[in-house]
Image: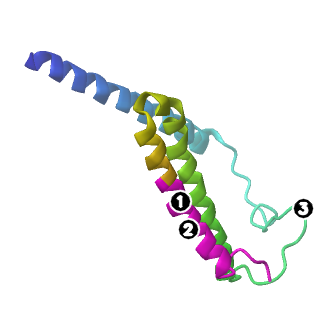
Amino acid sequence: MTETYLQQYVLIGLLGGVAIVLGALPLILAKLVAPKKPGPSKFAPYECGLESSGDPWMQFRVQYYTYALLFVLFDVEVVFIYPWALVWKAFGPVALAEMAVFLAVLGVGLGYAWRKGVLEWS
């Protein structure tokens, strides 16, 4: 019994080691084999074929982060809704009521953000 657990852990360790080697091997080979031709064009900043202009440490408005957080919130909501949609008939009306409460809480949050003007571009 103990031997089978040990064998499983050895197998997991072996698979982890193979994954690390397969991930690191191309990087090491590229470092050793790749030609090294440094020059000014290699170190120049590149953006869509145009010379970059302006300060690279530009600050973004807080509103962009708010949009990102709202997107993540509703993206994670889908992670919870999809499995529920697959099995909701098996759990009956209780599961339907629980999902309605979940969506209502998210709807209240969205309504609050909308009322505060967070979703308005200015």
**Residue that appears at 61% across and 40% down:** 30
The crowd level at tag 1 (other Cα within 10 Å; few <14, some 14-19, many 20+) is few
Residues at circles 1 and 2 in contact by the CB criterion of under 8 Å: yes
Point out residue 27 in the picture as x, y percentages from the top left corner: 55, 41
Q: Disc 3 marks which amino acid? A: Gly
Q: Can you say which quadrant of the picture contains the C terminus?
A: bottom right
Per the image, label 1 sits on a secondary structure element best described as helix
**In this rendering, is residue 18 above or below 120?**
above
Cα separation, mark 3 vs mark 2, equals 45 Å
Q: State the residue position of label 3.
A: 49
Q: State the residue position of label 1.
A: 104
**Residue that appears at 49% across and 45% down:** 80
Res 107 quadrant in image? bottom right
Q: State the residue position of label 2.
A: 108
Q: Can you say which quadrant of the picture contains the N terminus?
A: top left
The magenta span reads 101-122
Q: Disc 1 marks which amino acid? A: Ala
**In this rendering, is residue 112 above or below 102?**
below
Task: In the displayed orientation, state which residue is furthest to the front.
Answer: 93
